[in-house]
Image (cartoon, rainbow, N blue to C red):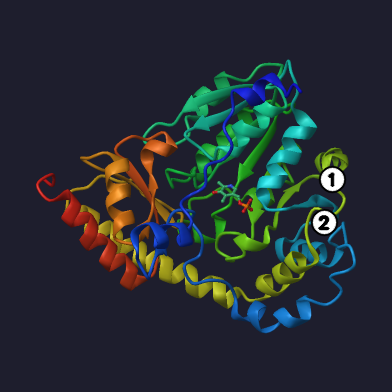
């Protein structure tokens, strides 16, 4: 048997440590997972309440077009239903975009470090991947434009960027869209959209009216807390969606995921409360980091990339032994750092103590 050459050089995605795994290894009762930017407050209680109803008719295939969810999201965003494509998480929408637009002989441009799935799926399609290093956590948009040629098919902009947490400003993105040639699809991944506090953001959904070559990705996995159900979506102009549809699996979002997403979207008070709590806990963390003169990026998301005077792996191991799962920067391409999802207030307080203890003697 012979698999594709490119796959032999690639590694499967390495997820953050699993809770049960750490419990067993370290003999701990309580584990706080702050590694995958999940919502520490769970998901809308409305979803839980209505869960029994969601279990009806599991013998039937889901509605492949996700008509009810489609109607809901279209009206929520004030776009046409034909402007949407749903995926088994926005991860799958990334895959569909790559299947549609990328092949050997063309190229795609992205920041580094950024969300790894753009690169991963592009490589599988045989496209050339052009990675432009971030500057202080920010996309280097000028250099990304410089890299465009007639063979460029897709540019990925992740805002706020995972793993740095910083966002692209309104004027920077406006300028970028003006300058970017129209043969290039610009995908703006807004997985952390609901967390963004600053007003200085590009109105991407509105931007679709002006830019035929724009696509926006959103997800129910982060602020909506439904990562386990796998549902995300893309918004673009009809022509883009039409070209994507043949590359989508016919039943790619489950009945339960569609139904839960509808209920979750209706409960905006859950989003307001939990993103509010997130911001407050993030400010506390910033205060702690400032106090201890630890460097970090000003995150607009629900996670923070913290620079350390020691290796990220060391801090990761230390926190793991205390029951906190975080992401080591070494694994994300930023040595001597960790990426930390903002958790509950009481957990964050304990975590800060543990960090401080580990850094004893290293702090300025
Ligand atoms: C988590 C994340 C996603 C993927 O979310 P799913 O909808 O769960 O697939 C996409 N983009 C970024 C930047 C993310 O951090």
Left or right side of 140 for 335: left
Q: Residue furthest bottom?
A: 49
For the point 57% across and 32% down, which residue is it? 11
Note whether residue 33 is visible.
no
Note whether residue 144 is visible.
yes
Residue 97 quadrant:
top right
For the point 68% across and 19% down, which residue is it? 5
The residue carrying pointer 1 sits among few (fewer than 14), some (14 to 19) or many (20 or more) residues within 10 Å by Cα, namely some
| Proximity of marks 1 and 2: CB atoms separated by less than 8 Å | yes
Element marked by disc 1:
helix
* Residue 145, x across and y down, in percent: 57, 24
* Residue 263, x across and y down, in percent: 70, 75
Tell which circle, 1 or 2, labels the residue nearer the N-terminal end. 2
- Does ligand 1 reach within 8 Å of label 2's beta carbon? no
The residue carrying pointer 2 sits among few (fewer than 14), some (14 to 19) or many (20 or more) residues within 10 Å by Cα, namely some
Work out which quarter of the rendered image holds the C terminus and state it. Answer: top left
Q: CA distance from mark 1 to mark 2?
A: 9 Å
Left or right side of 272 for 221: right
Q: What is the number of the mark on residue 238?
A: 1
Between residues 350 and 264, which one lies in front from this camera angle? 350
For the point 71% across and 82% down, which residue is it? 50
Between residues 7 and 360, which one lies in front from this camera angle? 7
Residue 343 to residue 290: above or below:
below
Between residues 62 and 17, which one lies in front from this camera angle? 17
* Residue 77, x across and y down, in percent: 71, 61
* Residue 59, x across and y down, in percent: 88, 69
- Residue under numbered circle 2: 80
Element marked by disc 2:
loop
Between residues 113 and 15, which one lies in front from this camera angle? 15
Residue 102 quadrant:
top right
């Amino acid at each position: 048997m012979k698999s594709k050459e490119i796959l032999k050089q690639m590694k499967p995605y390495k997820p953050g440590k699993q809770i049960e795994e750490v419990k067993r290894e370290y003999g701990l009762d309580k584990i706080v997972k702050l590694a995958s930017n999940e919502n520490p407050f769970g998901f809308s209680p409305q979803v839980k309440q209505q869960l029994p109803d969601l279990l009806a008719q599991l013998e039937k295939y889901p509605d492949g077009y996700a008509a009810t969810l489609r109607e809901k999201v279209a009206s929520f965003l004030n776009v046409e239903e034909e402007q949407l494509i749903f995926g088994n998480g926005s991860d799958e929408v990334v895959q569909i975009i790559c299947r549609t637009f990328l092949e050997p002989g063309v190229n795609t441009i992205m920041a580094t470090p950024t969300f790894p799935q753009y690169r991963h799926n592009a490589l599988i399609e045989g496209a050339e991947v052009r990675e432009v290093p971030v500057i202080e956590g920010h996309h280097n948009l000028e250099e990304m434009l410089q890299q465009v040629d007639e063979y460029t098919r897709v540019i990925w902009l992740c805002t706020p960027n995972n793993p740095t947490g910083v966002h692209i400003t309104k004027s920077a993105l406006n300028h970028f869209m003006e300058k970017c040639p129209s043969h290039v699809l610009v995908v703006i991944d807004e997985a952390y959209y609901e967390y963004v506090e600053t007003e200085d953001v590009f109105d991407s959904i509105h931007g679709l009216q002006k830019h035929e070559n724009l696509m926006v990705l959103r997800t129910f996995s982060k602020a909506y807390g439904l990562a386990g159900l796998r549902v995300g979506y893309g918004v673009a102009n009809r022509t883009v969606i039409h070209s994507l549809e043949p590359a989508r699996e016919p039943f790619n979002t489950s009945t339960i995921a569609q139904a839960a997403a509808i209920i979750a979207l209706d409960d905006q008070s859950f989003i307001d409360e939990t993103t509010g709590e997130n911001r407050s806990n993030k400010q506390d963390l910033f205060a702690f980091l400032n106090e201890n003169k630890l460097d970090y990026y000003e995150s607009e998301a629900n996670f923070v990339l913290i620079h350390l005077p020691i290796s990220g792996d060391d801090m990761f191991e230390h926190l793991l032994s205390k029951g906190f799962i975080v992401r080591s920067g070494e694994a994300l391409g930023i040595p001597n750092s960790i990426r930390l999802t903002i958790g509950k207030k009481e957990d964050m307080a304990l975590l800060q103590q543990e960090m401080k203890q580990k850094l004893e003697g290293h702090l300025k």
